[in-house]
Amino acid sequence: MGSNMELQGKKIIITGGASGFGSGISEKCIENGATIIIADINKSLANDKANELGKNAHSISTDVSNVNSVKNLKIESEKIFGDPDIIINNAGVTHNPDFIENISNEEFERVLNVNVKSVFLMSKEFVPQMKTRQSGVILNIASTAGISPRPKLTWYNSTKGWMITATKSLAIELAPFKIRVNAINPVAGETPLLKTFMGEDTPEMREKFLSTIPLGRFSTPEDMGNAAVFLCSDKASMITGVALEVDGGRCI
């Protein structure tokens, strides 16, 4: 257990919290005293993760791009712990790196639905009760792709730029209600998406990616978890509308 317990007693919903960066965020939230719901499209993976993390972790099978699935998440999460204090929009997908003319309509729709529409749906369902309570935190897991894009990932990059703008716009709209909204911009990390970003997972390709990160390593789920805990905690009570780069200097 963490000695500081920055999120003691907080109730948190983490989308895509069963794998990759989401898994690291789930672990750190539990370590810091929170009760969490892992809302993930992969039901068995979400169950396994919740079981691994113990009695304060729950899972609800959720497709964040589907309006009825997000409505169901609200209903089921209320049964588990009432209203969440914190929403972490972490679920995300990418398309294979390719020239824009080669990206299929289906790939484009999927990236847009999971990375963009999900934030709209989650906000619509969960913000009203935060406004009533006059408290709450939303954290969006965006990407350095939204501010310093790499080629051949145009539509993925664009969804992350959208997410960063949505973060700032929500922050200014919700500030009067004492709701903070921030984002984290990870650089490519050791997650299931890494191979997709690179096109192929070879030592040469890894070297090429690493050469663009001044600190010389990929970001890890633990890095994201630590940043998420800070931004969601009361220690960050004066921070809103920020997109924090957790990228080893990639965007300098």
Image (cartoon, rainbow, N blue to C red):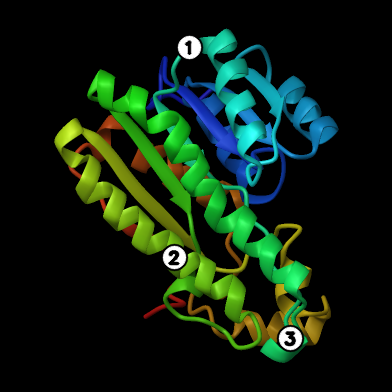
Q: Check whether the beta carbons of the residues at disc 1 and disc 2 lie within 8 A of each other.
A: no
Query: Which amino acid does the dot numbered 3 rest on?
Result: Asp
Which residue in the protein does label 1 denote? 82
Residue 86: x %, y % from top left: 42, 30
Query: Which amino acid does the dot numbered 2 rest on?
Result: Trp
6 to 123, vertically: above or below: above
> In 3D space, how far apart are the residues under numbered discs 1 and 2 (Cα atoms)?
30 Å
Q: Earlier in the sequence, mark 2 or mark 3?
A: 3
Q: Secondary structure at mark 3?
A: loop
> In 3D space, how far apart are the residues under numbered discs 1 and 3 (Cα atoms)?
44 Å
Query: Which amino acid does the dot numbered 1 rest on?
Result: Gly
Residue 136: x %, y % from top left: 32, 29
Q: Which part of the image, by quadrant, shows the N terminus?
A: top right
Q: Which numbered marker is on residue 71? A: none
Residue 99 can be seen, yes or no? no
Residue at image x 14%, y 37%?
A: 176
Q: Secondary structure at mark 1?
A: loop
Which residue in the protein does label 2 denote? 162
198 to 125, vertically: above or below: below
Q: Check whether the beta carbons of the residues at disc 2 and disc 3 lie within 8 A of each other.
A: no
Which residue in the protein does label 3 denote? 98
Rendered image quadrant of residue 107: bottom right
Rendered image quadrant of residue 64: top right
Taking the image as shown, residue 95 lies to the left or right of residue 202, namely: left
Residue 5: x %, y % from top left: 41, 23
Between 18 and 224, the one lying in front of the other is 18
Residue at image x 79%, y 39%?
A: 42
Residue 207: x %, y % from top left: 70, 84
Q: Secondary structure at mark 2?
A: helix
